[in-house]
Structures are given as C-alpha cells and as structure tokens.
Image: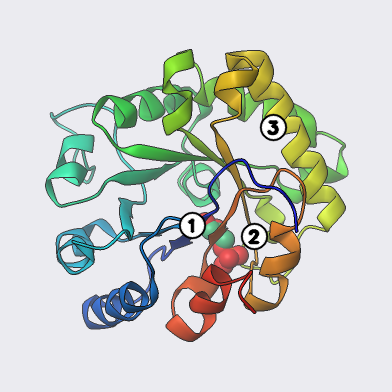
Amino acid sequence: MIHRVRKPYIAGNWKMNLDRARSLDLIKTVKGRLGDGNDREVAFFVPSIYLADVSAVAQGSPLGVGGQNLWFEANGAFTGEVAPRMLREVGADRVLIGHSERRHVFHEPDEWMGKKVRAALDCDLLPIYCVGETLEERKGNRTDRVLKRHLETGFEKIRVEDAHRLTIAYEPVWAIGTGETATLEQIGQAHRAIRKWCVQRVGEEAANLMRVLYGGSVKADNAKEIMGVDGVDGLLVGGASLQADTFLPIIEYDLR
Ligand code: 13P
C-alpha cells in the first residue's frame, strides 16, 4: 500500500458523448455508489449543454461536475464560447483546461492557457490543467521540454496561494483513445518531472497540495497499477467513464 498525502481524484471526461437521458442515468448510478467522498474525489466533465441537468442530479452528493473548456473573458462578442461565470451559474464547480483535443484538434495556442487557468480560479472553478506530448515529440526526445512549456504557459498567472486549487493531468496524446497506455515507467518519469517543476515554481509546501493525475486509455484492469505509481494522485478517464460498469471499478480501484 503506498502512502498517499493527497486525496485520490478520479475524473471522467465525457467529451462529446452520451445523450441527456444516459448522462442523467450515469450520474444517478454513480451518485448512489459514492460514499461520503472523504477518501476519494470523483467528478465528471460534461458537455456544457447538459451541465444544468447533470449538476441538479448530482446536488447533495460529493460528486463534482465540471465543464470541458471555457473562454477567459467574462462576456462579449465570442460566438460559441462559454464564460467561467456561465459554467458556475449552471452548477459546475470545476473545469478542464488545455485538453489535448482542444490543443490539437481545435488548435488552441499555449498563449491562452495562463489566462484560462486564471479566469477559472478567479471564478471559483477548480481547474484540471492538461499537459502532454505527442508521439512525434516523444520520439524526438522532446517530452520534458513540451511538459515544461505547457506548465510554464498554464502557470503564467499563478500565485503560490492558488496551488491547492490546481490539479494537473498528464495525458500523453498518443495514449488518448488509442488503447495504448503509457508504461508505468513513462508515467512515473513524467509525473516526477511535473512535480519537480511545480516545486521549483511554487515551493515544496504549495506543490505538495497539488494533485497530478494520469490520463490516456485508463481502464478497470490498469487503474490499480497506475494508481500505484509514485506521484500519481488520480486518473482522468475518457472512454471508460461513459458507463457505470466500466467506470465504477476505476473509482473503486483499491477496493477489489
Ligand atoms: P481515453 O481514456 O478515452 O483514452 O481518454 C483520455 C482522455 O482524454 C481524458 O481526458
């Protein structure tokens, strides 16, 4: 049993999947299975159009509900975008920022990341800031450099006192939705590099409060061993978070 200093955080990212009825069913089932939330934190990142309904069902439980993206301005001529206060208004208490699909499919540049993380915190949304290299970057031995660049841009406007509200997710792009999980050694290495960077940036005491999650083809049968890697504080799950029978065993990774 590894000694944990931070509460495990298991998050499901639905991406652009499910429909309203199946979303609500899933929330009801997971809510019914969660205890008091003292020993683990569980959250879903939901398409913004379903947030109000999903958070109404989750209310009164420790289940967290978050948006998958935001724009950093409070209002204005930004067609198609969602402001942090809008996410709050429909019940979200957290948000994903810099997910690899935002970076690589929608070409969100590094320069937006610091403003997005700042805007989330200023609106009382807990960000999970995603970082991770592509296959090409890994093959070119550029993983550390890419992680550093993602961290530097995302933390641009971070103060030491913000650290306890920040979570980082290491998601190697080549392991997302591919069925290919990073090896435990690769995960350990990346998590060590991320934590070292955080300690340098905000100091050891504040960095100790920040959780670093792993994401990329997490399934019921690899969740436990990944959670056993030193420095992994939780999991960010895509495909396997879409059904109760695949997600519950991940939430309960240590209970089997
Ligand atoms: P998969 O678990 O489907 O690989 O997705 C990971 C992910 O992108 C979570 O944000």
In the image, what residue type sits under mark 1? Answer: Arg
Q: Position of residue 123 (x, y in %)?
A: 23, 30
Vertical arrangement, residue 200 with respect to residue 209, above or below: above
Q: Are marks 2 and 3 in contact (CB under 8 Å)?
A: no
Circle 3: element type: helix
Determine which residue is flagged by label 3: 194
Q: Residue at x 62, y 41 (%)?
A: 5
Mark identifier at residue 40: 1
Quadrant location of ligand 1?
A: bottom right
Label 1 and label 3: CA atoms lie apart by 22 Å
Circle 1: element type: loop
Circle 2: element type: loop
Q: Position of residue 243 (x, y in %)?
A: 44, 81
Could you say which is closer to the camera, residue 216 or residue 225? 225
Determine which residue is flagged by label 2: 216
How many labels were placed on the picture? 3
